[in-house]
Structures are given as structure tokens and as C-alpha cells.
Image (tube, coloured by chain):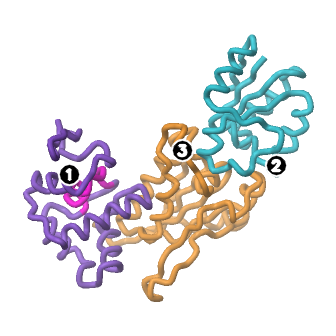
């Protein structure tokens, strides 16, 4: 399962709900304002980092660059471009979009 | 035009590209400031992301409007308050923000910092002291 | 609707503003000035160059008050007043000069 999240975890609980429902071995892709969840040293970083022992977290690089946080992404989060996004959706049998 | 100068406080709470609030707020600020009012901005919650350095929107097909905050000094917007706690929660410091300045005409155009970090108590008085509070 | 510049047609809106500011060249500026019946002089171009630089840095065209103040600072106090700018651009410095400079209509412009 691929979970995709486009809301900031500081503004909405979408990412929190997603992480609490994500099975071990699934993937989470942060895009649009969801990429704010990927910032190192934030109040949310620890929560995401602990989840990363069981799930793989990706962030959409164009959205990361747009928001000026490219040098602040938590180690271990994989940056993907639009093609990578498409490949992930093709690879996983189901996509769950947390709006 | 009325000669009464009112103090306007624009409260910015949204991240810049996910919704249109930030851009709309900036446009209203520019219009309001063109009419020589006392315009001040407060960035709190995800609004602090509006003024992060190094934004590059080339790959998302949207206009990067962060350079426009740099023009606000020319519009006599001298006070850009930033919520300290909101910055900390987001793993940011003042060094991650744009270097925003205004020039003091009375002191031979000396450059002064526009950004002022404030805590919750100071934010309460900012909102109380303003004649008009506009929240985006 | 378009503007013919050196044999090439550039896209404009219904009021004759360039749609793409990257299309702008000095020759395009000269053609745009003709549509406003402006006789361009070095003083006109000085303001046009200033506007383009301002837009490049801040991504907006400045309001008239901001333009006069900034011109006064950069080009001298004798030029930093609305009388000087309205003599150059009688139908409004921000509006007419922005058009010649190939910029969008200024936000909150008068």
C-alpha cells in the first residue's frame, strides 16, 4: 500500500492518522504541504522518524524545493521526482490518499 | 482619501503554495500599504513558511512570490512579527527566514531589520493594539 | 491580439500589455511606446530600466508612491516626484510605464 499525504502535520492530522493506520512495510509519500512533515528537528520529526523503522517515507522533491526546505529533510527520507511518484503508484497495488 | 491612519495587522497562518491564502494576503497587504496606512504583518503557525529562504518553484509550475516580501520595506511596512514558538515547532530559526529590511528615510536610508521575533504574550498585545486585524 | 516587433508577433492582452514578460526587448518597448503615443527619450528609458530591474528582484511592479520614492533615491531627488513622472508618462507612470516595460498591470495601481 502507498499512502500519500498532502497536508502539513502542523495544520492537519492527516499524517498522524496515516501513520497510525499504515501497516509495516507500506510506503508513505509526502507531497505539496505534506513535505513540511519531512523537516529535521521539528516537533513532528521524532514521530515520523520512529515510524520510519517500519515504513518507507518518500517526499516529492519539486515540492521540497519550492518550499525552501531542501537542506532540512530528515535523513532516510527518499526524494522522488514526478516520474518516481508515478513509478511508486504503479508498483504498489493500492493507493490511499489522506486529504 | 481619508487622512486618518489606522493600524492594520495581517495575521498569516497558512503555508504558501498548498492554498491561495498566503498570496491573497500578500496582495491585500500591497494594496493596503499603497494607501499609506500603518501596516504590520504577523506570521504564525504554518504562516512562518511563507518567508523561508531559498524557495524554488521552477518544478511545480507556480510563481515564487517570496521575493515580493522583500519589496514591503519600500511600501513602509516596517514590522514583520514572527511567532518564536511556531518557528521552533517547525525546526526553523530566524536564519532560515528571508533577510527582510526597511530603509529609514530620516536616517539617510539606513537599513533596518523588519523581522521581530515575538512570543505568545507579545502576540496578544499586537492583536489588541491593532485597529484592524485581518486573518488569512 | 498581438504586437508586431521586428517581423514577429508578440501576444498581448485586450489592453495591449505583453502576456509574457520574457518576450520583451528594447524594440518591443519602442513599439509598446508607440501604442501609447509616447516619444521615448533617455529619461523615459531610465524609468523603464528601473521598473524592469525592480520586477526582476521583487516579482511585482511597484505602486506609484513606491516608484517615485525609489526613483528619487536612485536617480536623484529632482526626479523622485510625481510631477516629473507624469510629465514623462501623462496617463499614469505606473500604468503606462509598466506597459512599455512589458510588465503586468501593477497591483493596486492608480
Q: Which mark is residue C28?
A: 1
C66 displayed left or right of A34: left
Q: Residue at position x 32%, y 48% from top? A: C21
User: Under tag 1, what secondary structure?
Assistant: helix
Find residue C28 and report its horizontal and vertical position in percent. 20, 51
Q: Residue furthest front?
A: C7
**In this rendering, is residue A58 above or below B134?**
above
The magenta segment is C94-106
Q: Is residue C100 magenta?
A: yes
Q: Residue at position x 40%, y 71% from top? A: B5
Give the image quarter of residue A96.
top right
How many numbered circles does the render carry? Answer: 3
Q: Residues within 10 Å of mark 2 (few under 14, many from 20)?
A: some
In this view of the protein, can residue B2 be seen by the observer?
Answer: no
Q: Rounded to the nearest whole Å, what is the CA distance between mark 2 and mark 3?
A: 26 Å
Q: Rounded to the nearest whole Å, what is the CA distance between mark 2 and mark 1?
A: 52 Å
Q: Residue at position x 86%, y 27% from top? A: A55
Q: Residues within 10 Å of mark 1 (few under 14, many from 20)?
A: many
Find residue C101 and report its horizontal and vertical position in percent. 25, 57
User: Under tag 2, what secondary structure?
Assistant: loop
Q: Colour in which chain C is shown? A: purple
User: Under tag 3, what secondary structure?
Assistant: loop
Q: Colour in which chain B is shown? A: orange
**In this rendering, is residue A51 above or below C73?**
above
Pointer 3: what residue? B57
Q: Residue at position x 64%, y 61% from top? A: B97
Single out the mark in the foreground, 2 or 3. 3
Single out the mark in the foreground, 3 or 1. 1
In this view of the protein, can residue A47 be seen by the observer?
Answer: yes
Pointer 2: what residue? A43
Q: Are marks 3 and 1 on the same chain?
A: no
Q: Colour in which chain A is shown? A: cyan
Amino acid at each position: 500500500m502507498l499512502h500519500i499525504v498532502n497536508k502539513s502535520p502542523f495544520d492537519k492530522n492527516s499524517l498522524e492518522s496515516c501513520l497510525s493506520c499504515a501497516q509495516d512495510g507500506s510506503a508513505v509519500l509526502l507531497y505539496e504541504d505534506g513535505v513540511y512533515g519531512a523537516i529535521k528537528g521539528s516537533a513532528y520529526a521524532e514521530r515520523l522518524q520512529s515510524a520510519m523503522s517500519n515504513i518507507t517515507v518518500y517526499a516529492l522533491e519539486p515540492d521540497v524545493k519550492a518550499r525552501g526546505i531542501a537542506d532540512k529533510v530528515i535523513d532516510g527520507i527518499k526524494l522522488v521526482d514526478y516520474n518516481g511518484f508515478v513509478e511508486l503508484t504503479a508498483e504498489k497495488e493500492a493507493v490511499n490518499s489522506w486529504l | 482619501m481619508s487622512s486618518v491612519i489606522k493600524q492594520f495587522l495581517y495575521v498569516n497562518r497558512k503555508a504558501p503554495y498548498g492554498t491561495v491564502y498566503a498570496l491573497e494576503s500578500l496582495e491585500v497587504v500591497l494594496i493596503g500599504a499603497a494607501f499609506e496606512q500603518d501596516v504590520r504583518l504577523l506570521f504564525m503557525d504554518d504562516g512562518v513558511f511563507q518567508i523561508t529562504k531559498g524557495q524554488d518553484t521552477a518544478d511545480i509550475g507556480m510563481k515564487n512570490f517570496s521575493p515580493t516580501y522583500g519589496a514591503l520595506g519600500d511600501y513602509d511596512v516596517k514590522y514583520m512579527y514572527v511567532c518564536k514558538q511556531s518557528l521552533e515547532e517547525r525546526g526553523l530559526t530566524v536564519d532560515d527566514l528571508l533577510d527582510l529590511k526597511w530603509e529609514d528615510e530620516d536616517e539617510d536610508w539606513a537599513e533596518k531589520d523588519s523581522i521581530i521575533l515575538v512570543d505568545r504574550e507579545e502576540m496578544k498585545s499586537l492583536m489588541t493594539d491593532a485597529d484592524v486585524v485581518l486573518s488569512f | 491580439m498581438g504586437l508586431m516587433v521586428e517581423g514577429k508577433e508578440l501576444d498581448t492582452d485586450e489592453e495591449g500589455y505583453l502576456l509574457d514578460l520574457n518576450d520583451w526587448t528594447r524594440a518591443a518597448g519602442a513599439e509598446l511606446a508607440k501604442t501609447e503615443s509616447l516619444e521615448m527619450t533617455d529619461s523615459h528609458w531610465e524609468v523603464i530600466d528601473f521598473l524592469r530591474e525592480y520586477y526582476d528582484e521583487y516579482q511585482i511592479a511597484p505602486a506609484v508612491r513606491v516608484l517615485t520614492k525609489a526613483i528619487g533615491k536612485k536617480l536623484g531627488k529632482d526626479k523622485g516626484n510625481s510631477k516629473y513622472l507624469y510629465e514623462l508618462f501623462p496617463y499614469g507612470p505606473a500604468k503606462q510605464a509598466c506597459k512599455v516595460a512589458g510588465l503586468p498591470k501593477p497591483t493596486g495601481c492608480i
